[in-house]
Image (tube, rainbow, N blue to C red):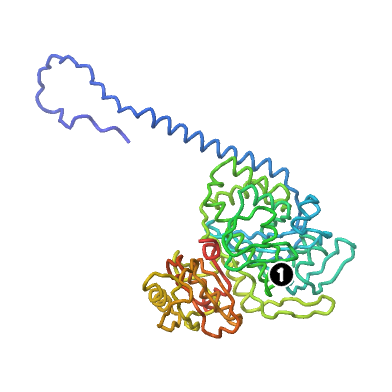
């Protein structure tokens, strides 16, 4: 496009006499920009260097670790796999590996005997597509399963599909048969495989400085040597291993153990995201070395994937994670040649796995401070409140707060026999233990105390530590939240 003329005057008019040239003045120099304070310049430069160095260190560390990870090929020659969904699905498998632990530690943490060469823990970890949520689904190791046709990795014989317990798939066909069996059962496509043993677990807990857990009841298990009084504890590697392995704490056996594993994972997320470990390149290096130093992973789980997960976790909080176990429809399902198994509830399990395939949350999001899910509705629990202190009116205040949350209080609080109670007590008849746990959840820090013969009315003895009543509500199967908890609902606090 031609440049327009500088002047719009016509050239057709009379000519003017030329004027003498006016001497030009030197152009005025623009004022120099205000100089930034030196401290700001130094800060910006330092920040840039730190950020670049951190990224470089992170990538270099992860690249070196990538070369050291033992690799497996769990997807070899796999056909007719489920359709890929949104997000990323990682099959996390916990194996024995006790032979790598020193003799003294094996004795201390009750790790005697030969390793089973089977999977002790099986979980599907789903990371949402926008990397703001992690959904963890525990698959009971005694789940009734039917394998696809496969070659036994020990004998080399080809087997047709046959029933077994889910954790036995690893012994017969290793990671590949485990992945194939899980995909057949869930119709969820597994993108990555990560196998962690006892050694890696203990090192990880130690390098983050221990993990804090809380328990309302004492936990004792003679098989693992676990012995924790009620209260708040920081568990180091060996004790943490006892905590997640314990199966004889109560009558819930493996299902109770999986709940404790979920609580521990929530506490570990809390530790990683609140301590600044993920933002400290050197600490991040130490953690990743501990985690990945003795694991096995698929060939596609490399540097980029690990860095992606690390970045995602920097934005995580306990409320970003949710945990559940596959709903069981029949306990003690006997199978000839296999023994007693757990059979999944087909309808509820399908609803759960469909949520993973569609990259949907397993639970309805509730803001922090919303009602906590408990096994028994407060409207079904009758409570007598006693004031165990010398504070006038405390009994009425506790009674009113519990009634406002839905509990059926007597509305006639009385004084306790002892008026120097420091910690609030929930006294209950052992036949109403589920109701007692629901009531204790509404009273943070309270102590559960079994009193045989107390009957259907539970007793709250308000202590000097009483601060508030937390809102609770019963599980709501209509919203698909049976057994689903968020990390901030099971971590300490």
Apparent side of residue 471 relative to residue 135 in the rendered image (left or right): left
Apparent side of residue 198 relative to residue 462 in the rendered image (left or right): right
Picture layout, residue 30 above or below residue 348 = above
Apparent side of residue 152 relative to residue 254 in the rendered image (left or right): right
489, 444: nearer the viewer: 444
For image coordinates 80% across by 79% down, the residue present is: 335
- The quarter of the picture where residue 432 lies is bottom right
- The quarter of the picture where residue 141 lies is bottom right
398, 198: nearer the viewer: 398
On the image, the x and y values in percent for residue 484 come to: 57, 70
> Which structural element holds mark 1?
loop
On the image, the x and y values in percent for residue 197 come to: 73, 55
On the image, the x and y values in percent for residue 6 come to: 22, 29
In the rendered picture of this protein, how many numbered marks are placed on residues? 1
153, 95: nearer the viewer: 95
For image coordinates 15% across by 30% down, the residue present is: 9
Q: Which residue is mark 1?
A: 248
């Amino acid at each position: 496009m031609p440049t327009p003329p500088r002047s719009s005057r016509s050239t057709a008019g009379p000519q003017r006499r030329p004027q003498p040239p006016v001497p030009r003045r030197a152009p005025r120099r623009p004022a120099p920009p205000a100089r930034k304070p030196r401290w700001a310049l130094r800060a910006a430069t330092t920040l840039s260097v730190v950020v670049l160095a951190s990224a470089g260190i992170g990538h270099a560390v992860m690249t070196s670790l990538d070369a050291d990870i033992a690799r497996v090929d769990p997807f070899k020659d796999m056909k007719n796999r489920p359709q890929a969904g949104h997000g990323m699905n990682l099959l996390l498998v916990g194996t024995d590996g006790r032979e790598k632990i020193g003799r003294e530690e094996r004795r201390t943490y009750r790790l005697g005997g030969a390793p089973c060469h089977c999977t002790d823990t099986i979980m599907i970890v789903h990371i949402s597509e926008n990397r703001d949520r992690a959904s963890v689904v525990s698959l009971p190791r005694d789940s009734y399963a039917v394998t696809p046709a496969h070659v036994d990795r020990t004998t080399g014989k080809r087997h047709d599909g046959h029933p077994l317990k889910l954790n036995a798939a690893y012994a017969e066909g290793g990671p590949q048969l485990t992945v194939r069996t899980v995909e057949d059962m869930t119709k969820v496509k597994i993108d990555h495989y990560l196998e962690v043993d006892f050694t890696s677990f203990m090192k990880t807990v130690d390098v983050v400085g221990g993990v804090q857990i809380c328990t309302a009841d004492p936990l004792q298990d003679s098989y693992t040597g676990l012995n924790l009084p009620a209260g708040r504890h920081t568990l180091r590697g060996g004790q943490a291993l006892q905590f997640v392995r314990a199966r004889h704490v109560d009558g819930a056996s493996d299902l109770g153990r999986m709940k404790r594993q979920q609580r521990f994972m929530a506490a570990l997320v809390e530790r990683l995201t609140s301590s600044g470990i993920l933002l400290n390149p050197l600490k991040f290096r130490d953690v990743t070395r501990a985690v990945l130093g003795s694991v096995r992973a698929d060939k596609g789980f490399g540097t980029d994937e690990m860095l992606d997960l690390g970045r995602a976790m920097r934005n995580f909080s306990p409320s970003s994670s949710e945990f559940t176990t596959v709903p069981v429809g029949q306990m003690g399902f006997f199978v000839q040649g296999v023994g007693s198994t757990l059979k999944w509830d087909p309808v509820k399990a399908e609803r759960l796995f469909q949520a993973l395939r569609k990259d949907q949350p397993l639970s309805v999001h509730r803001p922090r401070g919303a009602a906590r899910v408990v096994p028994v509705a407060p409207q079904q629990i009758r409570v007598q409140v006693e004031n165990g202190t010398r504070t006038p009116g405390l009994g009425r205040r506790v009674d009113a707060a519990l009634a406002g949350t839905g509990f059926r209080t007597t509305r006639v609080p009385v004084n306790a026999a002892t008026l120097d109670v420091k910690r609030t007590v929930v006294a209950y008849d052992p036949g109403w233990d589920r109701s007692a746990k629901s009531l204790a959840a509404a009273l943070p820090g309270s102590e559960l105390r079994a009193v045989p013969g107390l009957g259907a009315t539970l007793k709250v003895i308000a202590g000097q530590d009483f601060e508030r009543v937390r809102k609770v509500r019963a599980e709501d199967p209509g919203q698909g939240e049976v057994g689903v908890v968020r990390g901030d609902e099971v971590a300490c606090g």
